[in-house]
């Protein structure tokens, strides 16, 4: 290493030092500690007791709610992420059309994303009320359905209700799709026109491949957010996954164990399992993406 | 390179300036600064309430700061923390040794945290304050704060008083008199037994072409009171001696679950009972987001009878002034000794590592004692302001509480009957969650009443055993 390179290295490290120190203290250290706590019986205020893999054994072997929360979370994620992606892409395509007031429409569709989570959860409680909610009133009054879902009161409909509600906040993904669509070269559409392609063919053979990297990005972000779904379900289901644990999501169960039941070690074990599940899901998606994601210039 | 060092120096200088401007100080406001300058100690008070309930408390604290606080050389800073985040905040600040000097807290959390050595035992100090003697309090409120906990200072298990009861609640049957008239029932004669309750519920349930137009009564509306029904049926949820759940084979607990199941539609039955509802169509009130509004189903005439707390004496005139309603003791099965329900209290606790305990005690003595000029204690004013029942018996009997004929019925429940409280164990929240969760499964017919009682006992005892082990104690130590 030349003296110049050494000097550059030193200066670079000096500039990065505040981040390195902060990251180590606020991220690496707590993460390492949760590994330790996951192997202990720990309630924060009393000395921890080493129990080895006992927390993991209890989770996998004895705790039915753990499996239920995993199932509920997977159900929600597998329902909300594809539906959200499809709707966000459709909206982005509509909002890409050159029409008068385009910016206003884009703003309107993005607005729900910036509504605070708790406020939107309370709003949706009204919408989903089985007796007097907006949704069931519409189903009864306009569509004249004789039987309407009980939504959050019904164990069969509570998760679909939350999936439906999740579509309210697809504005973030929609904006990213808008940016992706703007990057699709116009010449490709012109070539398709010359070849006689219709709108559906252009979507399938031009738009979709060209925005596939954006779909991959939104898919991974959606998966991570889906597995960590917490605030809305906490507000809307009495903070404990009512009715009958049908909305007991993984993050909610983790929170209750750690902060309500003071089983912080158990909660730490759950956190690591969640991390591994998300990591695994992300790796699978990334591996499979080689088959369907197309990068311009490859 | 010199430029880089200059940049670093400038950055460090900026950090120092920011720290000097933004550094935490003892005084959070000009009033606190003035109090510190006058030699007063500033103590921090964490309020589990927010909104108008916190405002009522803050007004009394202002009174203290402007009067007795000057004599005591104490200034109280009140912070509204709220119920939802109280547990995690208390955990965090206690772990880092920087808790508030006083914390108002629900007794369900108090029991859990006292077993962790979080709070100061108050009995020796309270013995010096005449207004805080045990016999001044309703016995159930005393029981909710007086139990075996872990003394973080001496590292021993002791029976002590871990908080001072501030407010208490109880539940009664509320009924819509107009609905009674329409059903041909005497509007001034509520049901008195479980059998009568079912009979009335049947008559008051009105079905129309689009479903139920009026619900007569459902035991879990608006609150899941399974714990109460279990006690009212004569059952015993846990053994106070061993500290473990015992409900698994208790026929009366099973009967309480089975009775609630009768109110949910039975797909296998050829003929439904007249009062059944489909639980999949009627969520708890909180989910209907209408509890504190004119759309509350009881106010709106959609439910004829409910089990509710004394705060409704204030809520109903505010949101449904048109409603003609009555209040009476909750019916119980015949042959079971009458009982009242006072599940929990809000209590003032002093964290074990509070920095200004003596100053905290001075404020608490003022708050819980009659005023020097003969007026009632501030805590009594506080209960009047937030429409709760004072846990000090003599104060609950004041005209301002007993003068209202409806509020009076609530207070009377606590006077001469045994009062059932929520479980006083180190995992009380888990226990209550399991009880309620099992009820949901029973009425949704995903579990039998027998399975429900057994699952509550099994799950709770596993967690309790773990908790006792973690606390380095046998169950006997912790009881």
Image (cartoon, coloured by chain):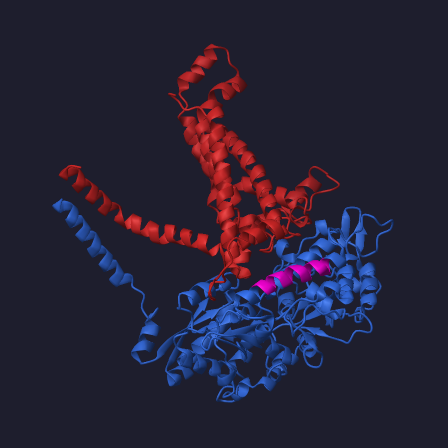
Chain colours: A red, B blue
Residue pushed farthest right?
B270
Which residue is at a point 23% across and 59% down the rendered structure image? B16
Q: Residue at x 83, y 66 (%)?
A: B195
B326 relative to B156 in the view: left or right = right
Horizontal side, residue B156 vs residue B97: left or right: right
Task: Pick the quarter of the image with the N terminus of chain A.
Answer: top left
Q: Quadrant of the C terminus of chain A?
A: top left
The quadrant in which residue B418 appears is bottom right
The one nearer the camera, A172 or B440, is B440
Is the magenta region chiefly helix, strand or loop?
helix
Residue B432: x, y in percent?
A: 64, 63
- Image vertical order of residue B70 relative to residue B274, above or below: below
- Residue A128 x, y percent position in the rendering: 63, 47
Nearest the eye: A38 or B194: A38
In the rendered view, does B446 fall on the left or right side of A187?
right
**Viewer can see residue B250:** yes
Residue A119 is at least partly visible in this image: no
Question: Above or below — where is A262 with respect to A72?
Answer: below
Q: Is residue B124 above or below residue A128?
A: below
User: In this view of the protein, which residue sits in the foreground, B372 or B335?
Assistant: B335
Q: Is residue B356 magenta?
A: no
Residue B374, image x and y in percent? 52, 89
Kindly give the residue lying farthest to the top in the view shown: A195
Residue B85 percent coordinates (x, y)? 50, 61
In the image, B427 versus A249, the foreground residue is: B427
Count of marks placed on residues: 0
Q: Which residues are magenta?
A: B452-466
B221 sits left or right of B156 in the view = right
Residue at 22% of width from left, 59% of height from top? B17
Q: Residue furthest left?
A: B2
């Amino acid at each position: 290493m030349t003296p110049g390179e050494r000097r550059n290295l030193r200066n670079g490290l000096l500039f990065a030092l505040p981040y390195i120190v902060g990251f180590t203290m606020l991220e690496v250290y707590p993460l390492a500690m949760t590994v330790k706590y996951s192997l202990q019986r720990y309630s924060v205020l009393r000395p921890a007791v080493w129990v080895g893999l006992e927390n993991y054994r209890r989770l996998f072997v004895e705790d039915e709610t753990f499996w239920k929360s995993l199932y509920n979370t997977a159900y929600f994620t597998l329902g909300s992420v594809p539906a959200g992606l499809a709707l966000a892409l459709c909206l982005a395509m509509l909002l890409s059309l050159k029409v008068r007031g385009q910016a206003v429409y884009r703003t309107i569709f993005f607005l729900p994303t910036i509504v605070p989570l708790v406020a939107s959860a309370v709003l949706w409680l009204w919408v989903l009320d089985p007796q007097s909610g907006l949704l069931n009133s519409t189903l009864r009054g306009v569509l004249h359905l004789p039987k309407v879902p009980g939504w959050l009161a019904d164990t069969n409909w509570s998760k679909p209700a939350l999936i439906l509600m999740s579509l309210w906040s697809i504005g973030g993904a929609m904006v990213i799709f808008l940016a992706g669509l703007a990057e699709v070269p116009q010449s490709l559409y012109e070539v398709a026109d010359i070849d006689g392609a219709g709108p559906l063919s252009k979507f399938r053979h031009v738009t979709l491949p060209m925005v596939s990297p954006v779909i991959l990005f939104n898919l991974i972000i959606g998966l991570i957010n889906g597995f960590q779904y917490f605030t809305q379900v906490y507000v809307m289901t009495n903070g404990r996954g009512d009715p009958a644990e049908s909305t007991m999501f993984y993050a909610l169960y983790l929170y209750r164990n750690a902060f309500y039941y003071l089983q912080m070690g158990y909660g730490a074990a759950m956190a690591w399992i969640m991390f591994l599940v998300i990591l695994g899901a992300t790796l699978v998606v990334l591996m499979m993406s080689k088959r369907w994601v197309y990068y311009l210039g490859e | 390179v010199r430029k880089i060092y200059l940049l670093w120096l400038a950055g460090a200088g900026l950090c120092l300036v920011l720290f000097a401007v933004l550094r935490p100080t003892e005084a959070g406001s000009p009033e606190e600064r003035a109090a510190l300058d006058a030699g007063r100690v500033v103590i921090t008070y964490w309020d589990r309430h927010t909104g108008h309930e916190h405002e009522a408390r803050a007004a009394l604290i202002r009174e203290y700061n402007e009067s007795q606080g000057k004599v005591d050389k104490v200034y109280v800073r009140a912070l509204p923390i709220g119920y939802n985040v109280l547990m995690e905040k208390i955990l965090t600040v206690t772990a880092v040794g920087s808790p508030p000097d006083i914390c108002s807290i629900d007794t369900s959390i108090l029991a859990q945290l006292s077993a962790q050595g979080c709070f100061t035992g108050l009995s020796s100090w309270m013995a010096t304050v005449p207004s805080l003697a045990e016999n001044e309090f309703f016995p159930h409120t005393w029981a909710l704060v007086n139990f075996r906990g872990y003394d973080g200072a001496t590292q021993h298990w002791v029976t002590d008083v871990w908080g001072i009861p501030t407010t208490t609640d109880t539940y009664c049957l509320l009924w819509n008199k107009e609905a009674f008239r329409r059903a041909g029932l005497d509007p001034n004669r509520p049901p008195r037994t479980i059998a009568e309750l079912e009979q009335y519920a049947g008559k008051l349930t009105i079905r129309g072409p689009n479903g139920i137009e009026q619900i007569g009564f459902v035991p879990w509306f608006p609150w899941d009171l399974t714990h109460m029904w279990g006690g009212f049926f004569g059952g015993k949820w846990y053994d106070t001696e061993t500290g473990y759940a015992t409900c698994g084979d208790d026929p009366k607990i099973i009967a309480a679950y089975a009775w609630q199941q009768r109110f949910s539609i039975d797909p296998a039955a050829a003929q439904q009972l007249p009062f059944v509802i489909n639980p999949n169509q009627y969520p708890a009130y909180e989910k209907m987001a209408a509890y504190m509004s004119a759309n509350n189903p009881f106010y709106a005439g959609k439910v004829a009878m409910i089990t509710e707390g004394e705060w409704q004496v204030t809520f109903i005139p505010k949101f449904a002034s048109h409603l003609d309603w009555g209040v009476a003791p909750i019916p119980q099965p015949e042959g079971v000794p009458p009982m009242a329900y006072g599940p929990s209290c809000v209590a003032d606790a002093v964290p074990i590592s509070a920095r200004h305990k003596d100053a905290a005690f001075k404020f608490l003595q003022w708050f819980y004692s009659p005023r020097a000029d003969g007026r009632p204690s501030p805590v009594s004013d506080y209960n009047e302001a937030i429409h709760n029942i004072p846990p000090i018996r003599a104060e609950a009997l004041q005209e301002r509480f007993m003068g209202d004929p409806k509020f009076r019925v609530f207070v009377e429940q606590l006077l001469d009957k045994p009062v059932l409280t929520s479980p006083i164990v180190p995992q009380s929240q888990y226990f209550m969650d399991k009880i309620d969760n099992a009820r949901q499964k029973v009425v949704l017919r995903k579990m039998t009443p027998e399975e429900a009682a057994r699952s509550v006992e099994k799950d709770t005892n596993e967690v309790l055993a773990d908790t006792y082990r973690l606390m380095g104690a046998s169950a006997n130590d912790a009881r």
